[in-house]
Amino acid sequence: MLSSCAEQDAFRLDAQLLSDLWVFRAAARHGSITGAAAALNVTQGAVSQRVLRLEARLGTELFRRSQRRIALTPAGMTLLGAVNGASAGLNDALSRIARSQGGALVVVCPPSLAIEWLMPHLPDFYRECQGIELHVRAEMVAPHAYWMEEQRVDVVIGYSHAPIAGLCQLAEFAETIFPVCSPATRQRLDAQPAQVRDVLLMHDDAVWLEGELAGAEWREWLDHVAEKPRWRITAERHFNLAYLAYQAAIYGDGLAMARSVGIQRLIDSGLLVPALDRPPVPSAHYRLMSLLPAREGSSAARFTEWLIGSMRRTQQRALAALEHR
């Protein structure tokens, strides 16, 4: 048993304890000593020694060890939660300090949304939110807290049906979907007999953060429509970006599944038109996520408010265009 003085010393923050906590966190994240050693660029022995030293200092086991893996004990889970919270707070403070010195708000956005919607609307953002600089990164990534900390990401925009565990959701916006095609393809379909129409389907197989599911967006749409279209699917093309499916529909003879926010620019330009005269159906949500809640008036809060408002206006224009066809 530790004496009261020794116990106080054991739980007092110092350079050694902070260092050992960082190693412990890496081991917990990777679920193995080997993975932590590779991530920290040290030997496995160094990681093991640090973890054992931390356990000895705290007087409790933090991991259950098996032949190849390690698993957190209840004490380890408690400690990891505290370490993650402290790390998120430090990263938030560092980001705020960087922005106060002219640093940019780092925003990660799905590539198709960045290309078709965010980039064309950035001038509006800079006019409405003067004094905030954005660093936009178009990436396909399943976000998590460790990744956001390592990459110094302030806000990540995801597209999913359910919230992402471990991240703070700043806001969400419900998307709707409907089939689109080129004007020439629509003319061809309308000229075919009403009983059956030959169609080529374009798929975005990486549509949601839930994972890659070939044809999932088309299946979701078909599940929602009351009257199934009389189509004979002659072929299917698969891509990993909605942008690519849209481009294939523009230059080819196929149908792509459109999201009302991301497709509005292409509909306004006349490059794509609705493939059917039917209302859109509900789908997933755009989710703005961060490590911590955004403080009122902060860059993240202002960006979030602007983005949700702009998405709402874009969607309203897209849906109005559908109603007036």
Image (tube, rainbow, N blue to C red):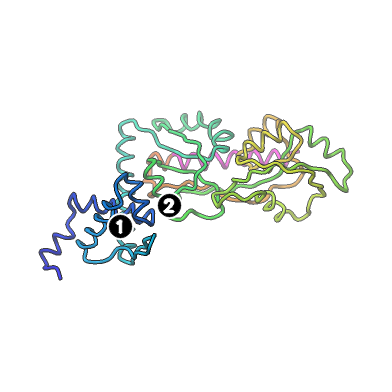
In the depicted structure, whether residue 227 falls above or below residue 153: below
Report the magenta residues as a range.
303-325
Task: Indicate which disc, 2 or 1, sits on the residue closer to the N terminus.
Answer: 1
- Residue at point 82%, 49% (across, down): 230
Identified by mark 2, the residue type is Leu
Quarter of image, res 317: top right
Instruction: Name the side, left or right, on which 71 lies relative to 281.
Output: left
Instruction: Name the side, left or right, on which 14 lies relative to 145.
Output: left
The image's mark for residue 144 is none
Circle 1 SS class: helix
Residue 13 highlighted magenta (yes or no): no
- Residue at point 86%, 47% (across, down): 196
Residue 256: x and y in percent read: 70, 41
- Residue at point 60%, 41% (across, down): 240
Local crowd size for mark 2, using a 10 Å CA cut-off: few (<14), some (14–19), many (≥20): some
Q: Between residues 181 and 8, which one lies in front from this camera angle? A: 8
Which residue is labeled 1 in the image?
Answer: 82
In the depicted structure, whether residue 173 falls above or below residue 253: below
Farthest bottom residue? 1
Give the Cα distance between marks 2 and 1.
Answer: 15 Å
Which residue is labeled 2 in the image?
Answer: 167
Residue 314: x and y in percent read: 60, 38
Q: Between residues 51 and 96, which one lies in front from this camera angle? A: 51
Q: Between residues 4 and 307, which one lies in front from this camera angle? A: 4
Identified by mark 1, the residue type is Ala
Name the quarter where the C terminus is drawn: top right
Instruction: Name the side, left or right, on which 10 lies relative to 321.
Output: left
Local crowd size for mark 1, using a 10 Å CA cut-off: few (<14), some (14–19), many (≥20): few
Residue 28: x and y in percent read: 35, 56
Quarter of image, res 188: top right
Circle 2 SS class: loop
Residue 138: x and y in percent read: 50, 36
